[in-house]
Image (cartoon, rainbow, N blue to C red):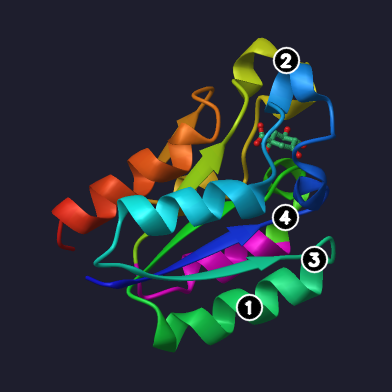
Amino acid sequence: MKKIGILNGPNLNLLGTREPEIYGSKTFEDFLAELKERFTQTDFLYYQSNVEGELINQLQEWATTQDAIVLNLGAYSHTSVALADAIKSLPVPVIEVHISNVYAREEYRHTSLSAAHCQGCIMGLGLEGYALAIQHLLHNHY
Ligand code: DQA
């Protein structure tokens, strides 16, 4: 497995400056550069959008081009039936990541509509959660 799509949802374009006490002070672009150095045998595509439909379009496109997907839908994981449906229809493994431990936060963050349609979910381990998801996808064949 070589081609992995990383999809980030709303407000995750602000990583680095957005609530750094929760999400850290690294931008995702800097983190992505580190990922590419760590996983040299992997081809990464990265996409971020604040728009629900654009995230769905990207997932549908990646259904035929990527071997696996790591995603953080941000608040949409708690609210979007449409994105949950999109994940459900994907023929490739998907792992959901949350940078923060959503169970240690407000109650409305305790439900993920998307997680049930993913292979697994990693949360509360900071940006490293994306790396752990990738590591898993590279070492386990579905
Ligand atoms: C988040 C958690 C969500 O509740 C929140 O809306 C986000 C980020 C996380 O990575 O911890 O935008 O998905």
User: Is residue 122 toward the left or the right of residue 99 in the image?
Assistant: left
Q: Quick one: which residue is furthest to the top in this view?
A: 104
What is the C-alpha distance between the residues marked 2 and 4? 19 Å
x and y percent of residue 51 in the render? Answer: 84, 66
Q: Is mark 4 within 8 Å of ligand 1?
A: yes
Q: Give how far apart the Cα atoms at labels 1 and 2 are.
A: 29 Å
- Given the image, on which type of amino acid does mark 2 rest? Arg
Element assignment for label 2: loop
How many residues crowd around disc 2 within 10 Å: few (fewer than 14), some, or many (20 or more)?
few
What label does residue 52 carry, if any? 3
Which of the pair 76/27 is nearer the observer?
27
Q: Earlier in the sequence, mark 1 or mark 2?
A: 1
**Amino acid residing under circle 3:** Glu
Q: Please provide the residue range marked out in magenta.
A: 82-92
Nearest to N terminus: mark 1 or mark 4: 4
In the image, residue 19 sits, relative to residue 6, either above or below, namely: above
Q: Secondary structure at mark 1?
A: helix
* Residue appearing at x 65%, y 32% in the figure: 111
Residue 53 lies in quadrant: bottom right
Mark 2 Cβ and ligand 1 under 8 Å apart:
yes
Residue at image position (78%, 52%) is: 13
Q: Which residue is mark 2?
A: 105
Residue located beneath label 4 in the image: 9
Residue sitting at x 60%, y 66%: 85
